[in-house]
Amino acid sequence: QSALTQPASVSGSPGQSITIACTGTSSDVGGYNYVSWYQQHPGKAPKLLIYEVSNRPSGISNRFSGSKSGNTASLTISGLQAEDEADYYCNSYTSSSTRVFGGGTKVTVL
Amino acid sequence: EVQLLESGGGLVQPGGSLRLSCAASGFTFSSYAMTWVRQAPGKGLEWVSEIIGSGGSTYYADSVKGRFTISRDNSKKTLYLQMNSLRAEDTAVYYCAKVEGSVGATKGGIDRWGQGTLVTVSS
């Protein structure tokens, strides 16, 4: 199972909105609504931001939102803040009943 | 409060074996699928294996299938990962994590994570 494709880096200024794409195939992202997104700060464990494409767990800011179109899922961070600087990973269920992560995207707040 | 505490990591020679444990507390352990995710130094996340709440079904990444075995003891609220025939490319921090319960194993979001245990495979 190949990793999902994410841009290596995305940057934005405080207050701006950025979007991270996660591209897969019809056997993973495109075939199911089981895409999740994670935030990881250096040296820390990942944190769940979005599950089932667009659902936020309790306690997650509504500045984080998820969507999907075809084989590409997206995470949008609005009102970018300094604390959003971190690595972000997408994850999808696959037709083999396994999971696959994206390669990760480093978000830089300028 | 949900807590997941991994143990068992360390240095092992190529071809060797290691068993990781993850002690869980703060939730009804037997009701949730559990998963192992690893992260090689400076690299991204890689899903390793997952097991449903009853332990009756297990799932593996192709990279570890046939070498790693996931299991759980619900009476002890503990998750395990038996790792055999270890290779240098298995060197990573291994995270134990809980899967949120609404849609089942390998589908739900991974909503609670341990702090990880480092496994180093080297001669």
Image (cartoon, coloured by chain):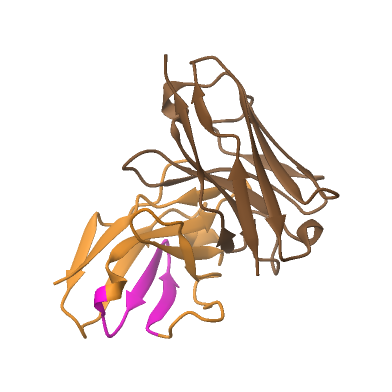
Q: Residue at x 70, y 66 (%)?
A: B101
Q: Position of residue A73 (x, y in %)?
A: 41, 66
Residue A46 in sight in this render: yes
Quarter of the picture holding the N terminus of chain B: bottom right
Residue B63 in sight in this render: no
Q: Position of residue B33 (x, y in %)?
A: 71, 55
Q: Which residues are magenta?
A: A63-82
Using the image as rendered, state which of residue B114 and residue A103 is in the foreground.
B114
Residue B85 lies in the magenta stretch: no
Main secondary structure along the magenta-highlighted residues = strand
The chain drawn brown is chain what? B
Question: Could you say which quadrant of the image residue A107 lies in?
Answer: bottom left
Residue A81 lies in the magenta stretch: yes
Q: Please determine whether, in this image, residue A92 is positioned above or below residue B66.
A: below
Q: Position of residue B87 (x, y in %)?
A: 47, 21
Q: Residue at x 41, y 79 (%)?
A: A65
Q: Colour of chain A?
A: orange
Q: Position of residue B16 (x, y in %)?
A: 56, 17
Q: Is residue B19 left or right of residue B62?
A: right
Quarter of the picture holding the C terminus of chain B: top left
Q: Is residue B12 left or right of residue A4?
A: right
Question: Could you say which quadrant of the image residue B113 lies in?
Answer: bottom right
Q: Residue at x 40, y 51 (%)?
A: A4
Using the image as rendered, state which of residue A107 and residue A75 is in the foreground.
A107
Q: Residue at x 43, y 75 (%)?
A: A66
Q: How many marks?
A: 0
Q: Is residue A9 left or right of residue A40?
A: left
Q: Residue furthest right?
A: B75
